[in-house]
Amino acid sequence: MIYACGGKRKPAMNSIKYKTVVELVRRRVLNGDYMFMGNPSERGLAQETGVSYMTARRAVQELIKEKILVRMKNGRLQPNSRYSNGHSCRQVALVTPAWYSPNFYQWHTSLKNTVEKHGGILRSVTYDNHDDPVIYDALDGKFDLVILNGVNPSPTLKLRLGRSQKKVVSLFRDMSELGILSIDGVSPDLLDGMIGRLTDLGHRRIAYFNTQQVSTVMSLRLSAWKLAMQKRALPEIILNEPVLPFQDSSYKSHEVLSRLLKRKELPFTAVFSTTVYTARGILRALHEADKSCPEDLSIFSLGDVFEARLCIPSIATIDTRNLESFVEDIYLRVLKGNINLKQMHYCPEHEYFKGESIGPA
């Protein structure tokens, strides 16, 4: 059927617009977008997408039929957040810093794979500070589980967490005293063994080298390093110049070591680089000064064995082992309520990667 100019729209065009609205709402529901925005309505969808009210209404009827939307008794629409492709769907919030952390990549991937494997959706919620309102929004939202990544709770947030009826898990921050299951990455306590290896090789001046931004994880690593130094009566040499959020720590570590190398002789023979990412800048500075690792400087780190293997020389490090299996086990325990209240703090198994970056003093 052909319409004259200015006549009715072609049915095909209406069909395309209707399907576009259906796909938009379906995607938002399945991604958990309506956890943080007002519920959809026919008029709102028509205004937002530029379709007619009747087209928006047709799309809504289809979404109700698919059980993606639910019509409440008061006539308003509500996303069926527990429905995804025909089965129950858990909504999990991962509350994580807005800045990129290379060390968290493996954890994020393991969490996403685990949640999706068991029919859920992982929604990332980013915060800019440890008392950011978005943290409270996530706790007040419609999520089945809230995972807090590196959040250092203020007194106000501690009170809020203490009253929370939701299932909450803390990553890289021990909140077990609040009754919250807490998970560490690579335990800083493992530093003692690494430093023991270096002292066996004759190293007595082992520096703490950090350019990662200020965080709970870095503070714990500094404390563990200090304990290892005190245990062996070794001098505390601290190079701690953290970058600001969104700045590159490897460029900063390159700058810091380059500055020291201009003095011709380093005041240490080995460094504990708080991350492998920071170690990359150290290696580059050594190369530019015609020095080498481990002949002129031994380096070891914690975490990110994949990145460590790619460095030249490869960086000695300690990383998690069987991370995805560990994450899945904890996830299922939390959802089933199968948690031992006497053990609220967990750490995955670890493995030592020898690398090529450690040698005799």
Image (cartoon, rainbow, N blue to C red):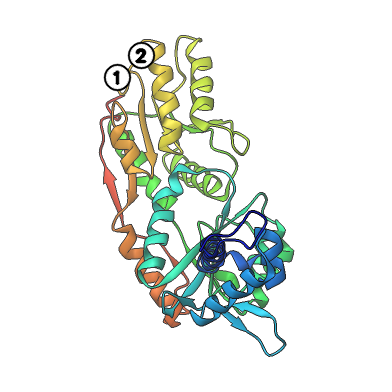
Query: Toward the viewer: 165 or 287?
Result: 165
Task: Estimate the spatial distance between the alpha carbons at disc 2 and disc 1, rounded to whole Å.
Answer: 8 Å
Q: Position of residue 321 (x, y in %)?
A: 29, 55
> From the viewer's perspective, is 305 left or right of 80?
left
Q: Position of residue 228 (x, y in %)?
A: 43, 43
Residue for badge 1: 295
Q: Position of residue 89 (x, y in %)?
A: 46, 76
Q: Is residue 177 above or below residue 223?
A: below
**Residue for point 53% across, 77% down:** 62
Residue for badge 2: 291
> From the viewer's perspective, is 50 left or right of 312?
right
**Residue for point 72% across, 63% down:** 155
Query: Toward the viewer: 229 or 137?
Result: 137
Q: Are marks 2 and 1 in contact (CB under 8 Å)?
A: yes
Tell me which amino acid carries mark 1: Glu
Residue 357 seen in this snapshot: yes
**Residue for point 67% across, 77% down:** 163
Q: Position of residue 11 (x, y in %)?
A: 54, 65
Q: Report helix, strand or loop for mark 2.
A: loop
**Residue for point 37% across, 72% down:** 118
| Residue 273 quadrant | top left
